[in-house]
Amino acid sequence: MVSKQLTIINAQGFHMRPAQMFTAAMAKYACDVIIKFNGADVNGKSLLNIIPACIKCGSNIELVCNGVDEEAALAEAVAMIENGFGE
Amino acid sequence: MLKGIGASEGYGIGKVMIVEEKTLEYTPHAVNDIDAEIKRYSDAVEAFIKETKEQAEALRVSAGAKEAEIMEGHIGIINDPGLKMSIEGLITGGTCAEAATEQTLDMFIGIFAATEDEMTQQRAADLKDIKHALLSILLGINEVKISEAPAGTVLVAKEVTPSMTAGINKENIVGIITETGSQTSHSAILARAMEIPAVLSVPNALSQLSSGEQVIVDGTNGEVVTAPSADDITDYTARRDAFLREKRELEMFRGRRTLSASGEEYELCCNIGSPKDAGKAIQADGEGVGLFRTEFLFMDRTSLPTEDEQFEAYKAAATILKGKPLIIRTLDIGGDKEIPYLGLEKEENPFMGFRAIRYCLKNREMFKSQIKAILRASAFGDVRIMFPLITAVEELREGKALVEEAKDYLRASGIEFNENIPVGVMTETAASGVIADLLAKEADFFSIGTNDLTGYTMACDRGNSDVSYLYSPFQPSVLRMIKSIIENGVKAGIPVGMCGEAAANPLMIPLLMSFGLTEFSVSAVSVLKVRKNIAKWTKAEADAVAEKVMEMATEKEVVDYLKSIV
């Protein structure tokens, strides 16, 4: 299991388009992708899980990947978030 | 007349077409062959995806890439693993595909609606849209074809779903009326993107209007005129034509340089509040950013943003601007802008108190991390630093010394930045106006913030209705202040911009041109209007106006005169 603490920097937060980009990217990995936010576990591969979590700009989250390709999944996930989803 | 929310400007005169969602009633049936039922569901999903892709393409042409992405998001949702698992699980348990689809989507709609976040609640509309489309496919029901609406149609619906919008032909649909929605709902965003006048949240619109009746949609004022008289039609036709003419005229100024009628060139930039707005500035044809407010990075959170977070945000804006100027104003808190975690004490007179540059110079570590973040971003574009609320030369010197310290640190760490980053002053206090000659010797540029400059010069709180009559940038004292700041900047050979609301005021523009302002920074929606207004005047005409105005003794004389000639 690997994990990293991150802050959401894009203005819209984890909203529709970022969540879509994120889940589409994570779908190709076999490992579990969990976003820990506000004491809850959010499935990082499910748009319908991420959107109602209302993760806003400035929120602190922990990304946890667990599985065979966890390193690669975490690296890509971190890059997307740190890059503000290209916004 | 029906009242609603004007969500997309303009006037449309046409005949009502009611778009009611077909009831998708069905009797749940027993499932004998589970595999066949799952296949029926997955076939429906496949048909849905094909349809949605077509709609997204149609939308890309009519409303732009952003709107098309919303449709494509529906494909992401239908492929969502949680959704798929729930629906297939229900079918495996003996529920028919229709009921499995409905129950699962209703569950997610409930979850979305239960959040206290307006944006998330609005996404429930996408889920309803998907549910509706999937059930229609499963039940073999055909939707009303909006794409076949005749010319001069006013669409009336409970809400405009994204899939509905995809069928809209801009040539034929002259107006939109809905029962639900707000300024920020999808219906509104799509209507604006397609430039169709829209009035949303009209109570009981569906029962009050009937297909075929003539109505006028006034998206500017949020009104629907029912059973219009001949006079109404004449009146609104004139308004519509004037609106469209003005819009066309403004569009003529897109992509052009900002020139006076006699050929002097000015810079025309935008004021922004987030990196995303930088994209809007470009879309609006801004020539750069004259004011990037950084408060958004510090607000709505519980602790200070890190240097890296700030760097990413500034870099994002610089990257979007592709080498166009980006003036970043350092943190301007205090006064009316509170940030709880900074623990600023309540004070008697916050506008005169511990705020902006005063606070930053006392909280040097925080200030330095912002300056370092800005310096790092300067490797990615034409980034400039601006200090707010300067009242004394020492403040500028101290700020510049911190910039040098930050440069030393970055140099030692081998981090790239622009060694010659311009450092300027936001001249927005009476003091900075009076010592503009002294500041101009040590600043790389000025930018006049007219809102605070007016308040501080007139010693007047515009929020207090007993004194707000004094609050006007056309007060002779404020005009003298503005003139002196510009002239002192010009004399010292530094650029002088204006990032306050007054820069977009048609009455103010000839005065600023005459005084020698070099840059106008306005909100994105005003860019083309300001360019058009600047093009109206020759330098000589503007000088003649300014000369007269500067001899006038009262604000009323100034405004009456300017109104008579603009």
Image (cartoon, rainbow, N blue to C red):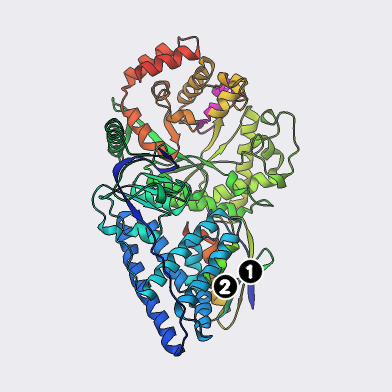
Residue at mark 2: A74
Left or right: where B398 falls relative to B257: right
Question: What residue is rendered at 31% in x and 32% in y?
Answer: B232
Q: Percent x, y for residue A48?
A: 53, 68
Q: Which residues are magenta?
A: B429-450
Left or right: where B254 falls relative to B220: left
Closest to the observer: B530 or B561?
Answer: B561
Closest to the observer: B382 or B165?
Answer: B165
Q: Is residue B430 magenta?
A: yes
Quarter of the image for residue B235 reads top left
User: Is residue B172 depicted above or below A65 in this figure?
Assistant: above
Q: Residues within 10 Å of mark 1 (few under 14, many from 20)?
A: some
Q: Secondary structure at mark 1?
A: strand
Q: Chain of mark 2?
A: A
Instruction: Report the amino acid beneath label 1.
Output: Lys
Q: Are marks 1 and 2 in contact (CB under 8 Å)?
A: yes
> Closer to the N terminus: mark 1 or mark 2?
1
Question: What residue is rendered at 69% in x and 47% in y?
Answer: B365
Q: Percent x, y for residue B503?
A: 45, 29
Q: Percent x, y for residue B183?
A: 47, 46
Residue at mark 1: A4
Whether residue B55 is visible: yes
Instruction: Report the amino acid beneath label 2.
Output: Leu
User: Is residue B494 depicted above or below A37 in this figure?
Assistant: above
Closest to the observer: B507 or B145?
Answer: B145
Q: Is residue B132 magenta?
A: no
